[in-house]
Each structure stands twice: as structure tokens, then as C-alpha cells.
Image (cartoon, rainbow, N blue to C red):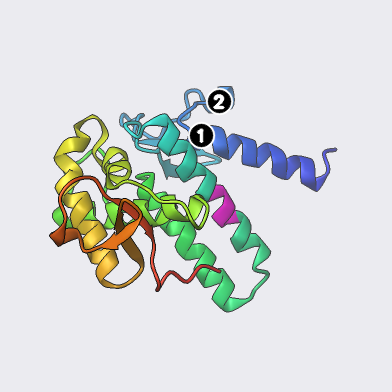
Amino acid sequence: MADASSTLSRVTDINLRVLLGERPAWQAGRVADADDDHYFVVDGRRWRATDPSIPEKLKTELVGELMAARRAVRDAKGEEAAVKAARARVQDAKVALGERGEPWWEPPSREGRQDRLAATIRTLLRHRDADKTICPSDAARVVGGEAWRDTMDAARDAARELAAGGLIEVRQRGVKVELDEVKGPVRLARGPAWDEP
């Protein structure tokens, strides 16, 4: 009989492979319905699949943050504030991956796209070191897939909203700037209101 740590390791490995879009052998033929690319079933429970249009490098970062957030929920051990913060991280990662929020295979509403872009920005910034930045195009690539360029204005809008609340700051050449006052490429960093547990 396997001990608890080896069982947890196996479950984490299976979850990671599923989140990365791989279909393990045990899952073959266990889809919920004709939308087999949209859902899968594990132990009788239906789960939404990860958006397959997310570039692999970015998907790996999002999944890495999701796994870290799940560990944070486990490690919070009933501390209400820590559990709440960790669950918010899980929610952001799952929305970014397309596993929650509006279905990734349907045309998004403006609000749904903005929610997913904001969740993606927060998730990528959490995953990277505190002094690292992301490009708005990273969020656009996650949400827009191959048509990511069409999502750039929306990604900049999401960044503008997060910056207005102080959660992130917009930088150009390492200097904080106002997004509406600059032209050219910018980077997004954690802002003064970033409160990470």
C-alpha cells in the first residue's frame, strides 16, 4: 500500500499532466460529452479543460503558480486570511488557464475578457520573482491565442485598470510611467498596493 506522500506525488503529477493538456492513459475515453476538447471527467466529476491555445511556456508558468497556490491553501491550516488569499490565487490561475470564468471556446464578453486578462497579469506576476516584470503581450497571448495581437488593446486596458488601483505599475525602460502618456513597449511590475502573503 502506497504511503500518503507517494499518493500525493502521483495525484500532483496527474493534475499537472492534465493541466498541461496531456491526456494520461487512464483518462482515455472518459470525456463528459461530445465537447471532448472542452471537458474531461475524473472519478465521475466533470472538469473544464485548459485552453489549448495558451503558448506552452506561458501555460507552464500559469500551472506552476496554480500548484504553488494549491500548496498555499493546504499549508494555511485554517488561518482564515491565509486561506482566503491562497484561494484567490487559485481562482486567478484557473481563470487565466480558462478553467473558470467564461468558456474559452466561446466569444468572450468585454467583461469576461478583462477579467481573464487581469487574472493572467496577476498570476504571471505572482509566479515570477518579485522584482521581475511581464509584458502586456504575455497576457494577450494567454487570452488571445494565435490572434493575440487583436487582444493587445484589451490587455493594455486591463493593465491600466490594475495600475489605477496601485496593484501593478507600468514601466518603460525601468521607469514608472502612465500608460496613457507613453508610446512603445512597456513592462508591468508589482505595484505599491501589491500585498502578497
Question: Which residue is at a point 55% across and 56% down the rendered structure image?
Answer: 69
Q: Report the amino acid beneath label 1.
A: Val
Q: Which residue position is annotated with label 2?
A: 24
Provide residue 160's location: percent of width, then percent of height. Answer: 22, 62
Provide residue 36's location: percent of width, then percent of height. Answer: 36, 29
The magenta segment is 66-70
Rendering quarter of residue 178 = bottom left
The 10 Å Cα crowd at callout 1, few under 14, some 14 to 19, many 20 or more, is some
The 10 Å Cα crowd at callout 2, few under 14, some 14 to 19, many 20 or more, is few
Is residue 40 something that shows in the picture? no
Q: Which residue position is annotated with label 1?
A: 18
Position of residue 98 relative to residue 159, above or below, is above
Is residue 59 something that shows in the picture? yes
Q: Is disc 1 in contact with disc 2, using a CB cutoff of under 8 Å?
A: yes
Q: Report the amino acid beneath label 2.
A: Pro
Rendering quarter of residue 181 = bottom left
Instruction: Give the SS element for disc 2.
Output: loop
Whichever of labels 1 and 2 marks the residue nearer the N terminus, that label is 1
Secondary structure that dominates the magenta span: helix
Position of residue 61 relative to residue 195, above or below, is above
Position of residue 138 relative to residue 87, above or below, is above
Q: Nearer the viewer, residue 48 or 79?
A: 79
Name the quadrant of the N terminus.
Answer: top right
